Image (cartoon, rainbow, N blue to C red):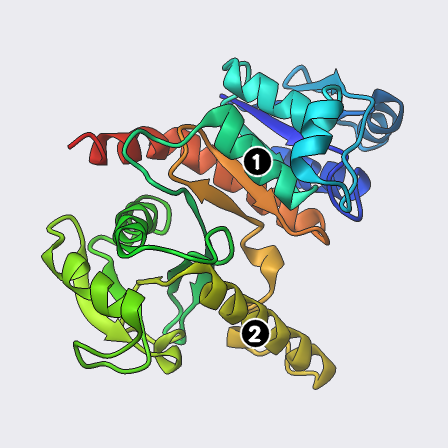
Amino acid sequence: MNIGIDMMGGDFAPLEIVKGLQTFLSHSNSKVEIFCIGNENEVKPLLNRYSLTSPNVATVHAPQLIEMHEHPTKALKEKQQSSIAVGFYMLAASKIDAFISAGNTGAMLVGALYSIKAIRGVQRPTISTIVPKLNGRHGLLLDVGLNADCKPENLNQFAILGSLYAKTILGIYDPKVGLLNVGEEEGKGNILTQAAYPLLKANKRIHFVGNVEGRDLFMDKADVIVCEGFTGNILLKMAESMYDIAVKRELHNDDFMSRLHYQNYGGTPVLGISKPVIIGHGISNAMAFYNMIALAQKMIESNLCSEMAESFKD
């Protein structure tokens, strides 16, 4: 399998990416070909310093860089030799099987939606976040920012995509799906949640357990929680702030609090597109990149994108 990494994406690139790659290769027993996409003048010396001269590691020269502040669509169009643009070209041409970047999030989303395309039948791809549970397990929250406004049908599709991801990647046999709402009773909520509830209830491809509230996020009531991206992003940022508070209060060594750290999960895949694209946090460190590469490997090995495509053939 071939995995492409944007070596220039992120605040600490390319050093932290090289460190993460070194950790991954030292732990991996599978034959994984890594394509390091970026400015060779910066990347090659680091690969040599960390003894990453294996035949399984190749560099692809991409002299341009899309900065974090640049307009995504304009930058992708004008910077065809940027690491992100080259990465999407390689993915679309099947030269790599997955693409990872902690660079300009907007450019990654534009590339995912327009270079790789949504799975036929998926109205809107989505992004999710892993949620640690108090019982030691993990759940999934989606959408967390890609779709600020949604239709009921979108939430219904998010539930299918999230269930497949939870089952295949998180190893949850029969994931319970909950609709984020302001009350548990059917009929609660705004126009969106009231209209989405009957769709989810009638959906035979998911295990719907009804409405869940914000207090249920870290509990075991649901494995997959669906909402529109506006609410989901607020919840995500709140959870990230809880870890920051724990660090300031010297509580971050607590088992649960430590699991709120983004580095444990690396990045988030864009669900609902035809090939694996993983977007990392801009401040990603070596451990985060290690986990992103491991997630890409798992998505390829499990053939998750093809499984999702099959589920939307009806």
What's the residue at 50%, 15% (across, down)? 94
Nearer the viewer's eye, disc 2 or disc 1? 1
Q: Is residue 198 visible?
A: yes
Q: Is residue 81 left or right of residue 252?
A: right
Expressed as whole percent of the image width and height from the top left, the position of residue 245 reads: 67, 81
Q: Is residue 115 left or right of residue 177?
A: right
Q: Is residue 6 visible?
A: no
Q: CA distance from mark 2 to mark 1?
A: 26 Å
Labels 2 and 1: the sequence-earlier one = 1
Expressed as whole percent of the image width and height from the top left, the position of residue 7 reads: 74, 33
Query: Is 213 above or below relative to 272?
Result: below
In this view, the residue farthest toward the bottom is 249
Q: Are marks 2 and 1 in contact (CB under 8 Å)?
A: no
What's the residue at 15%, 32% (across, down)? 314
Q: Any mark on residue 238, and which?
A: 2
Q: Any mark on residue 70, and which?
A: none
Q: Nearer the viewer, residue 49 or 160?
A: 160
What's the residue at 60%, 69% (across, down)? 240
Expressed as whole percent of the image width and height from the top left, the position of residue 52 reads: 75, 26
Query: Is 290 above or below relative to 113?
Result: below
Q: Amino acid at mark 2?
A: Met
Q: Residues within 10 Å of mark 2 (few under 14, many from 20)?
A: few
Q: Nearer the viewer, residue 209 or 157?
A: 157
In this view, the residue farthest toward the front is 191
Find residue 216 and report its image quarter.
bottom left
Q: Amino acid at mark 1?
A: Val
Tell me the element at label 2. helix
Label 1 belongs to which residue? 110
